[in-house]
Image (spheres, helix red, strand yellow):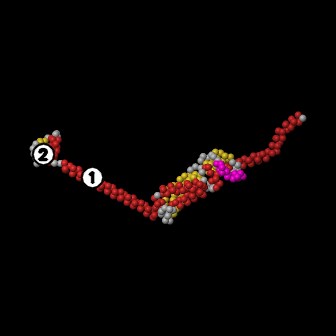
Amino acid sequence: MNMKLGDIFLSIPRRLRRHARENFPFFVVSTLLLLFVIVYFWQSIFITIHAGEAGVLYRRFGGGTVVDRVYNEGLHVVAPVNIMTVYNVRLQTVAHQMEVLSSKGLMVTLSLSIRYRPERQVLGVLHQEVGPDYLHRIILPEVEAKLRAILGQYEAEEIYTSKRGVVQEVVNESLAQVSQRFVLIDNVMITNIELPAKIRAAIESKLVEQQLAAAYEFRLIREEKEAERKRIEAGGIKTYNNIVNLSLNERLLQWKGVEATLELSKSPNSKVVIIGSGKDGLPVILNTNN
């Protein structure tokens, strides 16, 4: 019995070697086939989600789109039959040009800069309901619709001259509507407004005339203020002179003349002071230099 068990154990390696020799072509073909499958489906099996990105998984035989999980940055291994879609969840900016009609039917061309990003928390629902082309299917149509609805209430001149206030109103409307569709619009900015050449020239000419009229009105107000100031100043001078005239008399003037003569006599210049009565009753000063 012991000999039989020993023979059995000794025969196992021989059987394995014989089995390997007999099935060697099969092992080689299977290994090569496995390597071929891995290499061929490498990008579908090993998914790298880079910084600022997030992934949504679609299971072909497991219920479709996974809406309750968003795959974060890093390396993920996925079955070849499944599909991982990677989204850029950073703020993105797109330039867009569109045409709107003013309240009087004038065509206005707008150049827009739209800043947006998908909502990370509902990325799976966005992928299921809309797909990766959400920019052209949600954002641009919504922004255009809001712009046309709001700017259609203004004349071309109002759009051309007061675009900042209009843009703010459009942004508020767009944020309220589009955010309900799994996307956040951070800002919509009108970078340029183009009108027909004749209309634009007429508006610019009108603006220049308005500025000139405002400047002329300002000058009129300034001159009126200056005239008022001069009238007040003249009235003050007149009042002062009246007060001074009432306080002056002949003896006071003579006394002031004597005080002035004394001050002049102290001057280092050579002079002769004659004390006496001139025609005004004041001393006479003779300059000896002359």
Q: Furthest residue to the bottom?
A: 105
- Residue at 52% across, 57% down: 170
Residue 69 counted in the magenta span: yes
Q: Residue at x 65, y 45 (%)?
A: 75
For the residues labelled 1 and 2, the Cα–Cα distance comes to 35 Å
Residue at figure coordinates x 32%, y 55% from the top left: 225
Residue 141 among magenta residues: no
Percent position of residue 218, x then y: 35, 57
Q: Residues within 10 Å of mark 2 (few under 14, many from 20)?
A: some
The numbered mark, 1 or 2, whose residue comes first in the sequence reads: 1
Give the label on residue 108, or none: none
Circle on res. 233: 1
What quarter of the picture does the N terminus occupy? top right
**CA neighbours of label 1 inside 10 A, class few (<14), some (14 to 19), many (20+):** few
SS type, badge 1: helix
Quadrant into which the C terminus falls: top left
Looking at the picture, how far across and down is residue 109, in whole percent? Answer: 51, 61
Viewer-nearest of labels 1 and 2? 1
Amino acid under label 2?
Leu
Q: Which residue is mark 2?
A: 282
User: Which image quarter: residue 161?
Assistant: bottom left
Name the residue furthest left: 276
Q: Amino acid at mark 1?
A: Glu
* Range of residues picked out in magenta: 56-70
Q: Using residue 245 as the reference point, say whether residue 67 is left or right of it.
A: right
What's the residue at 15%, 44% (across, down)? Answer: 255
In the rendering, at what x and y percent does residue 229 appear? 29, 53
